[in-house]
Amino acid sequence: MSTADLDTRMMARALQLARRGRYWAMPNPHVGCVLVRDGHVIGEGYTQPAGGNHAEIEALTMAGDARGATAYVTLEPCSHRGKTGPCAEALLAAGVSRVVAAMEDPNPEVSGRGLARLQAAGVEVSCGLLQQEAERVIPGFIARMRRGRGRVRAKLAMSLDGRTAMASGESQWITGPAARQDVQRLRAMSCAVLTGVGTVLADDCALTVRPDELGLDPASTARASVRQPLRVVLDSELRTPAGARVCSVAAPTLICHRQGLAASGPVLPAGVETLTLPHGTQGLDLAALMAALSGRQCNEILVESGPRLVGALLQQGLLDELIIYMAPTLMGDLARPLLQLPLQRMADKVALELTDARRVGQDWRFTAVPRH
Ligand code: AOF
Ligand code: ZN
């Protein structure tokens, strides 16, 4: 096998490993690392739950002796001391002679310094192999680092005639078990799940991740490490009942309300946090909310709400992706539409790019990106 072929194969393996960290590494990006010597894999690793080892340290630990090896990493090894020590130094200390990275770390604390440090110490360094694939593994982290706002995706479920709830608000369930399990995976990959108080009052949704439904290997310890996303409720007037399932201790909760509320709201359970947001004619300031979530290191934000919030995010250019599950059913014209988007002229229609369409059980899942 040529060096180029071996490099591509090993980076593909590192990307596979990286994805294993997707339910727990946040706010850290999930990274994979493979150590190879004389054409043989001598170590493999991936990012451990936040605060734990980075991918490189895991791979070095497995290898024991990594002198003269090539390290394949899906993200540039870090050069800074964060919760853990710098991986570039660890690779140097272990005597690794070549480092192949898929992409530079967009974290301004690193951004090229890890690779520069290795190169300065005489390690052969290259960057950019399978870069597009690597960027697709951690889009939320990249978005937060580059533009100061994580990736925002909305999940919607509709009938074939584009309806999301009956006139009464009844909406459980439109899609089947396979689609709902798919949503569990989306939630588990997210740092925050965002909804409105209307959805809380109508559905009393828990918005938690049920690790048993993620399809993980029952023998693996990964299930115990699955992180619960921060549940964020947009609730201008603080109408969330203290006994709502979204306030349960199963996961952290942040309730966002407007300024100047009389102190007569419900007494929320200990552990439920509140946040004051500016309030305008259109309700709570969504851009300010996104800034606050970025401050809390949210890479991936999943919106699971009614048609109004999704419409508002779309109109304000704050939505990066729509994930729409379509069930083979008709709900009729009295039922509620997918989105609240008061458009009049064809010229106003929102252009989307359909990036994926696939069957999930009895339903279909469409992924679409707004064209800005
Ligand atoms: C790596 N390997 O596996 C990951 C990296 O606070 P810390 O120490 O966990 O550092 C977090 C930062 O490290 C994170 O923002 C990103 O720049 C980098 N992540 N780096 O060398 C890894 N996950
Ligand atoms: Zn590191």
Image (cartoon, rainbow, N blue to C red):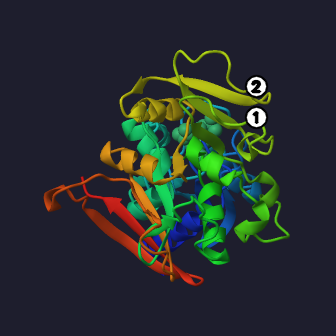
In the rendered image, the vertical position of residue 184 relative to residue 278, given as above or below? below
Under mark 1, the amino acid is Ala
Which is nearer the eye, 326 or 219? Answer: 326
Q: Are marks 2 and 1 in contact (CB under 8 Å)?
A: yes
In the rendered image, the vertical position of residue 144 relative to residue 257, given as above or below? below
Q: Residue at x 60, y 39 (%)?
A: 232
Which is nearer the eye, 114 or 70? Answer: 114
Q: Read off the residue under disc 2.
A: 267
In the rendered image, the vertical position of residue 190 relative to residue 137, given as above or below? above
Residue 2 can be seen, yes or no: no
Mark 2: give few (<14), some (14-19) or many (20+) Cα within 10 Å.
Answer: few
Mark 1: give few (<14), some (14-19) or many (20+) Cα within 10 Å.
Answer: some
Can you tell which mark lies on residue 270?
A: none
In the rendered image, the vertical position of residue 105 relative to residue 255, given as above or below? below
Q: Is mark 2 within 8 Å of ligand 1?
A: no
Q: Residue at x 52, y 47 (%)?
A: 301
Instruction: Tell me residue 117's x, y (percent).
Output: 48, 37
Q: Quadrant of residue 72?
A: bottom right
Instruction: Tell me residue 67's x, y (percent).
Output: 65, 54
Under mark 2, the amino acid is Val
Instruction: Tell me residue 183's x, y (percent).
Output: 61, 64
Q: Read off the residue under disc 1.
A: 242
Q: Secondary structure at mark 2?
A: loop
Q: Secondary structure at mark 1?
A: loop
| Residue 236 appears left or right of 250 | left
